[in-house]
Amino acid sequence: MSDTQHESVRLAPDPAPGLTKVGGDTPVVSPPAGRRKRKGIGWPARLEIALMTGPTLVVFLSFVILPVAMAAYYGFYSWQGFGPPTEFVGFRNYVFIFEDGTFLAALRHNGVIVVLSLLLQGPAAVLLALLLNRQIRGQTLIRVLVFIPYVISEVVVGTGFSLMLHWDGVVNAALGKIGLGFLQAEWLSDPNIAIWTLMGILTWKYIGFAVILFLAGLQGIPEELTEAAAIDGASYWQIQRRITLPLLGPTLRIWAFLSMIGALQLFDLVYIIWGQYIADTAGTSTMATYMVANGRTAGEYGYGNAVAVVLFFVSLVAALFYQRFILRRDTEGAITGGRN
């Protein structure tokens, strides 16, 4: 190659800082990167955002934030619920909550219910969902029967079980009839048994919801994956453990979150079956039943509001912790669109 040819293919020198080549080799002035004007959204887009989020924001502030703020306000007073609160007590109500052994016992019961709900309902619901996801005779009928307890009112469930599990109820009578009288027990009042009785009722009541949720998650798993694994010689349980359960992970985590929040706020079944006083001695009281017994029933609405605020923040901290460390893997892709 001649010198002339070398000159023709020689690259042009880089432009000076602040100059950009456009088209040919002629540099033009471009604004510094730090001074580039960002293109914002226009007023039509802003109006659209305001119209879409405004009603939701108003409802959220009116029915979530404002009641919590009002409860926190009343929690600073000794108030019996009549007229405006006048006896300011500062943080005395909040301090007394964490010094009261009854509340600490209720908090511990809530923790036990959360753990046992995850350990008992989760595996049982997964096994039932895997069974009902197969082609078996009476599949639809079994699904309906499993889901029926979930749609029955808590009042009906609580009243029914309180009658059946009484010492003179049908459960002990049936055990005596079939020769298992040694298993008869005070299912509702024995502190060593009552929490397990409650867990049995909760599992029977809410396992149908978990099964339906898991079945919906199983429908989203491509059959090609399990068919390919079966062709490669994987057994049924190997397919479930290696393919099905990992792909069902997001559904499992959502169910665990709902179960955890529901267990922390459990009230109706305990209140109906054990009442507001027996629950303490039976070892089944919860923060919600404690709030009603020591707030509304005792006529100490200021103290009851303080307990409600504590219950709210316990649930909020648990939800934020779960969102931060557990659910983040499922939501960050949806929120960021997969961008880093």
Image (spheres, helix red, strand yellow):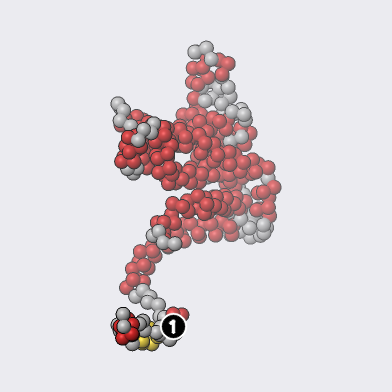
Q: Is residue 31 left or right of residue 141?
A: right
Residue ID at (34%, 75%): 42
Q: Residue furthest front?
A: 2
Quadrant of image for the N terminus: bottom left
Query: Looking at this view, is 134 or 46 the one in front?
Result: 134
Up the image or down, 18 lies above or below 188; here it is below
- Residue 6, located in which quarter of the rendered image? bottom left
Q: Are there few (<14), some (14-19), or many (20+) residues within 10 Å of tag 1? A: few
Q: Is residue 115 left or right of residue 123?
A: right
Pointer 1 residue: 32
Residue ID at (62%, 29%): 192
Q: Position of residue 197 (x, y in %)?
A: 54, 30
Q: Position of residue 75 (x, y in %)?
A: 61, 55
Say what secondary structure mark 1 lies in: loop
Query: Looking at this view, is 134 or 184 the one in front?
Result: 134
Residue ID at (58%, 38%): 112
Q: Amino acid at mark 1?
A: Pro
Residue 69 in sight in this render: yes
Q: Position of residue 149 (x, y in %)?
A: 41, 33
Residue 297 in sight in this render: no
- Residue 125, located in which quarter of the rendered image? top left
Quadrant of image for the C terminus: bottom left
Query: Looking at this view, is 111 or 31 the one in front?
Result: 31
Up the image or down, 249 lies above or below 82; here it is above
Query: How many labels were placed on the picture?
Result: 1
Q: Position of residue 241 (x, y in %)?
A: 43, 37
- Residue 127, located in which quarter of the rendered image? top left
Residue ID at (33%, 32%): 134
Up the image or down, 103 lies above or below 46; here it is above
